[in-house]
Amino acid sequence: MQEPEIILIRVSGEDKPGLTAAVTAELAKYKADILDIGQSVIHDTLSLGILVKVPTAAQSTPFLKDLLFSAHKLGVNLTFTPVEADSYESWVDGQGKIRHIVTLLARRLGSEHIAAVTGVIAKNGLNIDVITRLSGRASLDPAHSPRTACVEFSVRGTPADLTAMKSEFLAIAGAMDVDIAIQEDNAFRRNRRLVAFDMDSTLIAAEVIDELAKAAGVGEQVVAITESAMRGEIDFKESLRRRLRLLRGLPADTLAAVAERIPLNEGAERLITNLKRFGYTIAIISGGFTYFGNRLKERLGIDYVFANELEIADGKLTGEVVGDIVDATRKAAVLRMIAEREHLSLQQVIAVGDGANDLPMLGIAGLGIAYHAKPVVKKGAGQAISTLGLDSILYLVGVRDRDTLA
């Protein structure tokens, strides 16, 4: 029995409406089966590839002549390459390979950035299947260009050492002032539903307790305790208790004054507006204070706030909190609880934070992001963003600029 012919057809030239329709109409005359098809357009230039199986009843010579004539009338170039059956079956057998998405983000992307990232991809034996620009088109006039640039690479294969590959990306990111994320491309990556944020220095551009301490005139003392905790001399709970005691007697109306002057971090409002539009549930899980979290809840439409509640008596802070302190362990437990309440797998969760006490929360989330964090946190988290605002997280879930509200 004669085997059917398999032919790879490549079409290139100026893009125009109806071009793909015209080419496939010629294929339809011979009832050719389309085994694979892919198309991209860069600056109105089309690149179309079609892998076809020509039925044994058809002869390839007139089939290809008709295709070439059609391409001539359309004003495009057409080439074709026969594909051996064994080569085709080998390609089919490779369809179960693991895929990853590598996302490259920066204020500006140059050839040196692309070369560095693709060099690591090649070094690790991965094939790039698709490259997609997620950011808007860049104007030559800087005043009209997007403020961010993002390219996404879909790669196939299993890295020899994924941890080492991430380390290489982290080194490039630090040296070239870009951010690079790598995620397994699976159903969960395309189906995130819950985003949990730390608050201080993540959603907002300050540490609230430091601002309260300045208002109370004990700023230097609070900073000293914070530094002691960072050196590992005291744990988070004890450090919080010591700092809060220094705030004893601070008028409660100071909270409103401090809240008014603390700005959101870059991109926070745009990110949450779009996440809510796309149906995400939003949570704040913070070692900060509920007063400030609830103000953000009202302003941004956040669904959950879990933080420490300041105890107030006779209009003043008592220097204590109500209930249990929200520390690193508690943050992770709360995240699990919210996911269960929302009937979600932890793989559908994104967690964002900047401190070491966020690492347990970042570690259990399907996508854990260290935001403008110290090196130890970047290394411990799954991904890191250090050059752009919070709204760049939209790129990590595959959202294009054109799909978002400004």
Image: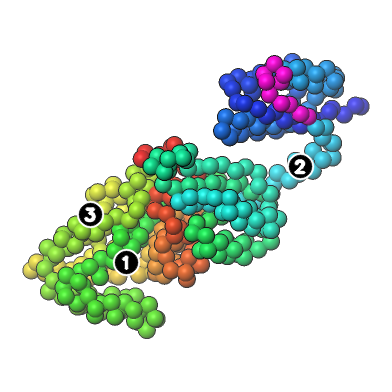
Mark 2 Cα-neighbour bin, 10 Å: few <14, some 14–19, many ≥20 = few
Q: Which mark is residue 287?
A: 1
Q: Which mark is residue 252?
A: none
Quadrant in which residue 294 is drawn? bottom left
Quadrant in which residue 119 is drawn? bottom right
Mark 3 Cα-neighbour bin, 10 Å: few <14, some 14–19, many ≥20 = some
- In terms of sequence position, does the residue under pointer 3 or pointer 1 come before the other? 1
Looking at the rendered structure, the kind of residue marked 3 is Arg
> Is disc 3 in contact with disc 2, using a CB cutoff of under 8 Å?
no
Q: CA distance from mark 1 to mark 2?
A: 51 Å
Q: Is residue 3 visible?
A: yes
- Whether residue 21 sits left or right of residue 205 in the image: it is right
- In terms of sequence position, does the residue under pointer 1 or pointer 2 come before the other? 2
Read off the residue under disc 2.
Answer: 91
The picture places residue 59, in percent across and down from the top left corner, at 85, 19
Read off the residue under disc 3.
Answer: 295
- Residue 230, relative to residue 332: is it above or below? below
Q: Quadrant of the C terminus?
A: top left
Of the pair 262 and 277, the residue shown nearer to us? 262
The magenta segment: 71-80
* Residue pictured at 70% horizontal, 44% vertical: 95
